[in-house]
Image (cartoon, helix red, strand yellow):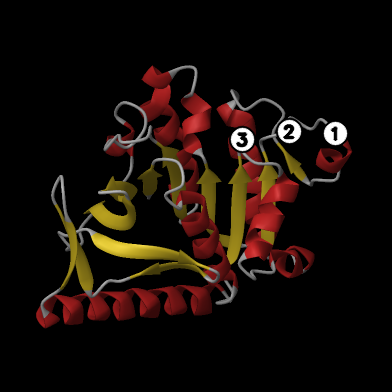
Amino acid sequence: MLVSGGPGTGKSILGKQFLYNGLTKCEGGVFVALEEHPVSVRRSFEHFGWDVRKYEREGKFAIIDAFTGGIGSAAQRERYVVKNIDDVKELSENIRAAIKDTNATRIVVDSVSTLYLTKPAMARSIAMQLKRVISGLGFTAIFVSQVSVGERGFGGPGVEHAVDDIIRLDLDEVEGVMYRSIIVWKMRDTKISMVRHPMDITDNGIVVKWDKYLKMTNWSVSIQPLPQKDVDEMKKAVEEAEKEVEVKVEEEE
């Protein structure tokens, strides 16, 4: 899954929330830090009251340091370190090792854009390589992807064709007021909501108002209620997805 958006839209928070929710359901998780020091990553989790250190000690959660290159005393204490982020093979080996050690079923790569920052033409190829590694192990992954302010793309030419699912987060200014929203752009073999939903970033993480949609023009914004039929369909889809996750975890245990 690709989670795309500009700066400040909540991409990293969504990824971390996805991992923490999994940890509370006995699903191991791995966070690949490409743009943030591992120490800062842990602090970011803690900011929302998500104690991942506990799960690290229990061997259920791991951070892969692909930011420091192993330089610095703090970095030297990390168990999984990628010294050359241009080496996709080294990154893949660390991901495999961390997944094996934690029995992870959820992985977040933040941000995959860093891997092809200096070579955008390789965006699709790099995303496909990582997808093969993770999909081959049968797990769910979020690739965080950056776009420029105001851009409606997905970050990197062709990267959207290398993933099965795309979620885009937006932050729009209309008449001096900022509005956050989320839209499911594609979800393979799944019926999706064809509207932009309002969302907030709270002290407890991201809250999406799935029963409403954002109606926008160049000069106005209004939040409208979704038809009850659409709300009921989404609730049913979420419940079915949660049941599938529970079955998978029980089978693994």
Helix, strand or loop status at disc 3: helix
Name the side, left or right, on which 85 lies relative to 249.
right
Residue 112 to residue 191: above or below: above
Residue closest to the eye, 128 or 64? 64
Q: Please tell me in which quadrant of the rendered image residue 152 appears.
A: top left
Q: CA distance from mark 3 to mark 2?
A: 13 Å
Rendering coords of residue 91 (x, y %) = 61, 35
Q: At label 1, which amino acid type do we have?
A: Gly
Name the residue located 72 percent from the left edge and 28 percent from the top edge. 83
Residue 61 to residue 23: above or below: above
Instruction: First in sequence, mark 3 or 2: give its number.
Output: 2
Q: Which residue is mark 3?
A: 91
Residue at the farthest right position: 73
Q: Which residue is mark 1?
A: 72
Residue closest to the eye, 112 or 94? 112
Residue 68, numbered label = 2
Name the side, left or right, on which 74 lies relative to 5.
right
Q: At label 2, which amino acid type do we have?
A: Thr
Helix, strand or loop status at disc 1: loop
Mark in the foreground, 3 or 1: 1
- Inspect this view and state whether residue 192 appears: no
Q: Please tell me in which quadrant of the rendered image residue 93 appears.
A: top right
Rendering coords of residue 124 (x, y %) = 36, 29
Residue 184 to residue 68: above or below: below
- Label 3 close to label 2 by CB (< 8 Å): no
Name the side, left or right, on which 193 lies relative to 104.
left
